[in-house]
Image: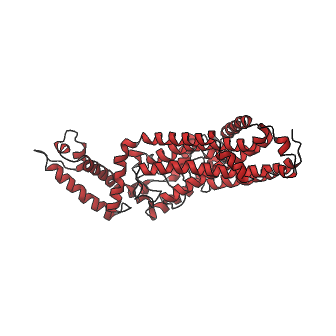
Amino acid sequence: MIKYEMKKVFQSPLLLGLLLFFTSINVLLMADHIPSRGSVNVLSDIVGTYGEKATEETLHSMESDLQEGLVWSNSHVEGERYQSLNEALNDSDAPWKESIPQKRYEQLQILHLYSQTGSQADAFYRELDFTTFSSSVIQQHGLSGGAADTVRSQFKKIEGRKQEVAANDEHLAFFFHGLTFKMHTFLFKEIGLILLFEVMALVVLLSAYVSTYEFEQRTDLVVFSTKRGRKLMRDKLAASLCSAGIFAGGLTGLTLLVYFILFDYSQLWHSSFSNYFMRETPVPYISWWNLSFIEYVGLFVALVIAVQLIFSAISWLLSIWLKNSYLVYLAFAVVLGLFLWIPGLVPGHSPLIFAAQFSPFILMLNPHAWFTVNNPMTMFSYYELMTILSWGIGLGGLSLFRLHRFKYQAIS
């Protein structure tokens, strides 16, 4: 019966049409960044030539090649010579730029950028002190009392993680220059956030469609009147969860596949996620654990699917109660708004302000900060896991209770 229920989903023109529509939207979003792809993809050549980390030996080798570029540029000017490659690159009227191939010019620019950034990494992490950030975070969010103490305690843990990053040389791993290209924000915040809302829309639609099908087709009195019929809601729950996982994984997989075809990450899969190069703000991205980029992507996909399974279970519970797909959509929107509103009601002095963040609705708003120390309100090492487990266990128990009640309730 589970196969039969899932068949309804995969034969629905609306759901399949939305899947293709959302995929097209994501591809068009990526297309806007295609003009910068050439400069971005130069990094793979750099990593292939110099290695994965900006060690002293690597930086020395890069500097030697940059000096060759300086000599070459000086050979194409008359009179006063450039004292540095940076001066040569910033000279907009330089005659040598007309004789150098565009690709070679971009390579020199990017090589100089990464050489300069890599030479700053160690000093930056020595001066970076997370314990001093707690005061500004407390003031920014209006925290006091127990909530402020929680922030101070967490920032001490973050400082320990930062020291671990520096000791392991995680910060020296090459990655796309964050201040220039903002690739992390583009992939995990812009595309990631849109993707999460797209999948949520699909999951709520399919879960409500499957779970209310008999009620809306007016066949419920026939189907649910038998002993086996009452067990059908269990099959509908399983079908909703399985279909939600497939649709979530499918749309996420298609989106990431197109993204990684367009942008060359071939040399960066095993780069440390907690690197200095990816920094887009005064605080660099630091994961709670020593993760490679491909491991981070894997965790991202797994969490996207897990969040959508929770949304599917919520939709199923609403469907048993409301028995109408349109009312389920409306009720889910109300639940979403409610859980986004609740954290704003908690007083700033109470540690409960952090407890209010442990919901899948809050979780999905900041995909770029998942598994990192970079969101002050969710800077707990197991925030994502605890959110999924607590909601999963709670919804699992509630689902069992509703299945038991459904066996004996009147169908009308």
Q: Is residue 140 above or below residue 228?
A: above
- The x, y position of residue 325, in whole percent, is 73, 37
State which quarter of the image contains the C terminus: top right
User: In percent of the image, x 74 and y 35: which residue is there?
Assistant: 327
**Is 365 left, or right, of 102 in this rendering?**
right
Near-viewer residue (363 or 245): 245
Q: Residue at x 49, y 58 (%)?
A: 294
Q: Nearer the viewer, residue 329 or 388?
A: 329
Q: In the current view of this chain or complex, which residue is farthest to the left? A: 79
**Camera-nearest residue between 223 and 378:** 223
Asked whether the viewer can see residue 34, the reply is: yes
Q: Is residue 412 left or right of residue 130?
A: right
* Snapshot quadrant of residue 172: bottom left
Viewer-proximal residue among 247 and 132: 247
Q: Residue at x 18, y 47 (%)?
A: 82
Q: Position of residue 1 (x, y in %)?
A: 75, 53
Number of marks in picture:
0
Q: Residue at x 80, y 37 (%)?
A: 218
Left or right: 300 with respect to 74? Answer: right
Q: Position of residue 169 (x, y in %)?
A: 43, 63
